[in-house]
Image (tube, grey):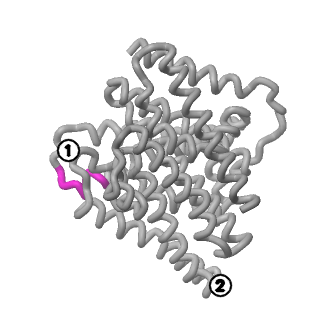
Amino acid sequence: MKAFSTLSVILILLYLGGYINRSGNYIEWMSRDYTNALKGFAILTVLWAHAGAWSGVEGIQFIAGIGVVLFLLCSGYGLQISFEKNGLKGFWKKRLLRVALPFWLVETIGLRVTEQWDFKTCASNALMLKPVLGFEWFIQFIVICYILFYFVQLVAMKRTSEETEALDEKLFYGLFLLWFVIDSLFLVNPVMPFLRARQMLSFPLGVSIARHRKQAETIFSKPRVFLIGFFAGILFMAVTQLEAVKELPYLIQNLLSLFTVLPLAVALISLTNWWRMLADNNVLKALGLVSYEVYLVHIFTLGLLRGTLWSNIIFVGATLIGACGLHMIFERFIRYG
């Protein structure tokens, strides 16, 4: 526990360092800087929670769930903004270069180094059928989000009126609802049945915010949204831990889990909307640019944690250096390839 406390201090100092030489300029809500800051905060929570779980701290995993909500929400938001500007031009090429190839590269190297590599494992990873390590479920999840987004936007391109656009949005949520039911009934993992299910509204919510930006900014600027989100998240978090609830069918458990980490993430976005300084942080913005790469690399660097101060420093340093290197490689490849 002492070693985890020192890691917490390191991450807090990293965050506070982002206020050094801060420009102090007004940061626009859901701008690129703002969403990068959200993703930067998200990856810090993921690193903190996963390192805590790795170190034996119980009950900390839900913090990572809040970070995943922010990732998915920002991803849905960014894809919708991109679609409004460019349509579906180069959609799968971008996903291949920015998501799939970095994942395959890190997995191949990581599994080789940790001596978990074999042909069957690599084939499964290449097709994203079955994650080798527990944290890799997110990659499969986000790819399914892309597929559903692409399908709905194909339908949307054939429609023009506001009425039919509303129907497209209902179709989008309907597909995620169907996925939620299928996952809860047939694909559930008894160890963590809520892992995917509680995230089902995160990506489509990001798309909806992009579609209704002005209304969304007005809603998120209200202090009561923060209060409702915060207390609702805490309440449902407590409810889902009750033994009586854990004995209910997975579908009902997962339905309750929808209102745990998502409201807490909504509360955070609301807080940073009317207190912009929290998001106007240079470290968060920089981390947001490499957040996906940090997620990939940390899956393997967690093994560096040994319960000492130096192992904490090495873990953070190796994760950030590896992520920045991976980001630079693929940015250069995308730019000149």
Give me the disc on residue 246: 1
| Quarter-of-image position of residue 154 | bottom right
Instruction: Give the main secondary structure, helix, strand or loop, of the magenta stretch.
Output: helix
Residue 307 position in % (x across, y down): 40, 17
Which residue shows up at 58% across the image and 83% down it? 164
196 relative position to 99: left or right: left
**What label does residue 161 carry, if any?**
2
Nearest the eye: 304 or 114? 114
- Judge depth for marks 1 and 2 and give the one in front: 1
* 324 lies left or right of 19: left
Q: What residue type is labelled 1?
A: Lys
Q: Is residue 278 above or below residue 195?
A: above
Q: Does the magenta stretch include residue 252?
A: yes
Callout 1: 10 Å neighbours few (<14), some, many (20+)?
few
Q: Position of residue 245 (x, y in %)?
A: 21, 45
Q: Please report contact status of discs 1 and 2: CB closer than 8 Å, yes or no.
A: no
Report x, y in % for residue 323: 59, 40
Seen at 49% across and 13% down, the residue is 309
